[in-house]
Image: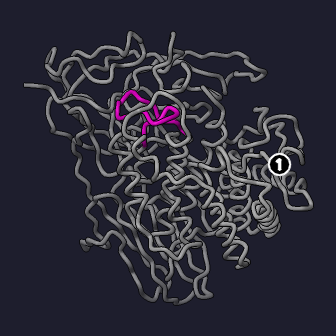
Amino acid sequence: MYSNFKYSEIRPTGWIARQLRIQAEGLAGNLDNMWPDVQNSAWIGGDKEGWERVPYWLDGFIPLAYLLRDKAMIARAQRYLTAIMDRQQPDGWICPCSDEARANYDMWAHFLICKVLAEYGVYAEDDRAVECVYKAMKNLYSRMKEGSTALRWWGKFRHFEGMISLYILKERYGEEWIDELAQMIRTQGADYADYTEEWKVPIFCWHQQTHIVNLSMMLKSEAVYLPFSNGEYKDEAQRLYDILYKYNGTAVGIINGDECLAGVSPVAGTELCAVVEMMYSCEKLFAMTGDVKWLNLLERVTFNALPATTSEDMWTHQYVQQANQIGCAHLPGKSPWITNGSEANMFGLEPNYGCCTANMGQGWPKFAHGVFLKSENGVLAAVPVSSRLDTVINGVKVCIECKGDYPFSDKAVFTVKTEKPVKFEFSVRVPADGEAKINGKPRKSRIIKLNKTWRGEQKVTLELKFTPRLTARPRQMYFAERGSLVFALPIDAEWRMCEFERDGIVRKFPYCDYELYPKSDWAFGFDSGKLKFSFGKVGDIPFSEKNAPAAIKAKLAPVEWGYLRGYTTVADRYPAHRKALGPAKEFTLIPYGCTKLRMTELPKIKK
């Protein structure tokens, strides 16, 4: 129903362009310069990791380079792409392993590199990349047909990822084997509907079917199989998400999992890989179904969970973030996480494990790439974030530019310019639960369609209105929100730098590790539900803690709230009592995405 424009047609502007540049100058933009698993990967002929890390990194680095029009970054991406394609075997096998290792190879990396190459080939207009995917998937088809390859382990539980590239091949080649391969993959893949009972109570051991990244990817599975199925779409994503959210959900829409499902506790963790994969699932779900609820969830995850789990300069990140996060330090003794180690919520180069180091880069570029989408009859402004589209519709050059600081502003102005008169449908999506006006007139539709002949230069003004409110969470906890933004009480932090070397991997500034210790009080409850909202200025760092672009004033009172199992940097799951220990005062809550230490879920004070 909807599809992406080419990279050359989209130009991010405003705060999203600044965020992309911060990423380019940070960790995700420099892994090929300093991280051995990318710098010397087996994918390009080196002797380091040759499985998921380079494909993960390219999945974000390629769109980042092209959207920024950064020639040096594009050249670096091309070096990797060329090396990978040059090493493809004559029979089509593309992954870096010996012939003897093929039979037991985990095909997850195959699905991932094919997705990267196929999307790059389409959006950057490189036919060779799509042809490489054709040969790689044809090789997989032959091997699965003869029984020399079967899905196992990660490939079995991430089988649906193969549909991204197969759909592109189906659109371009339309050959019968493509549909047949899709059905073989689906038959051998895991059916997550069989495991829903295991999602309801945290199981303190590691399982693929409760792995949070698998589950975040899984949401799009029914949708991406649609082009290969004659069945009716049943919206399994919503049914499965509802189960996951009821028993493991968070205030910002993501699912608790560290690494496996961890319940609804506000001090449970959520892995960064799960954040960016849920974003991608939402993008694909909307593209295939046209249901705006997935864009609402996409915004909630993007504007809150994604920026909260990286440092402002994006040189460091967490493996897991917490809704109530009063410290990020190396924890003594046994870790409080389900399966993660004691460094999992520290900010650093690869705290706990390096998959998120490689994978986190896809979040912002893919989001920016999808601000404008192709619709069946024209163009959809999917998210009213500043960006410019230059495309051709019915043979006529069309430019659509959005200006505004949404979600840090309630107004967006679209300027539509056409080379000559041309008829098409320009649609604007209304975010979340907001009231909307188009050019001053109230509109109730969630997608407002303007089907007309466009001439010269015309403006479309979108005005939004949201109401700040307290929203209930389990165990009589509450959080503040307005539109897509969740708000939290920021905690002043002391950042302690940790430079060291482990297993041949050096951590040094700016990609060193950090421990964060609280310097301000954090044990409070909401004294009332009265909230006063205001916008600030969006600065050079969009999600700045010291210069937050939005705020909510709320009255909070201190409560008794201890630490979890004696830890001094982990709050207890819930307060010991909900009676005020002192007078209520007015505090400033800021967007969750602007915080590094925070209290998001608070009780209401018992009067």
Farthest left residue?
607
From the viewer's perspective, is residue 277 above or below residue 3? above
Q: Position of residue 506 (x, y in %)?
A: 74, 22
Q: Is residue 561 left or right of residue 376?
A: left
Most frequent secondary structure within the magenta stretch: loop
Q: Is residue 457 left or right of residue 88?
A: left
- Name the residue beneath numbered marker 1: 102
**Which quadrant holds the C terminus?**
top left
Q: Is residue 28 left or right of residue 471?
A: right
Q: Is residue 485 magenta?
A: no
Image quadrant where residue 135 sits: bottom right
From the viewer's perspective, is residue 336 above or below residue 81? above
**What segment carries the magenta color?**
255-272
From the viewer's perspective, is residue 147 above or below residue 562? below
Depth order, front residue of 159/563: 159
Image quadrant where residue 570 sits: top left
Depth order, front residue of 464/302: 302
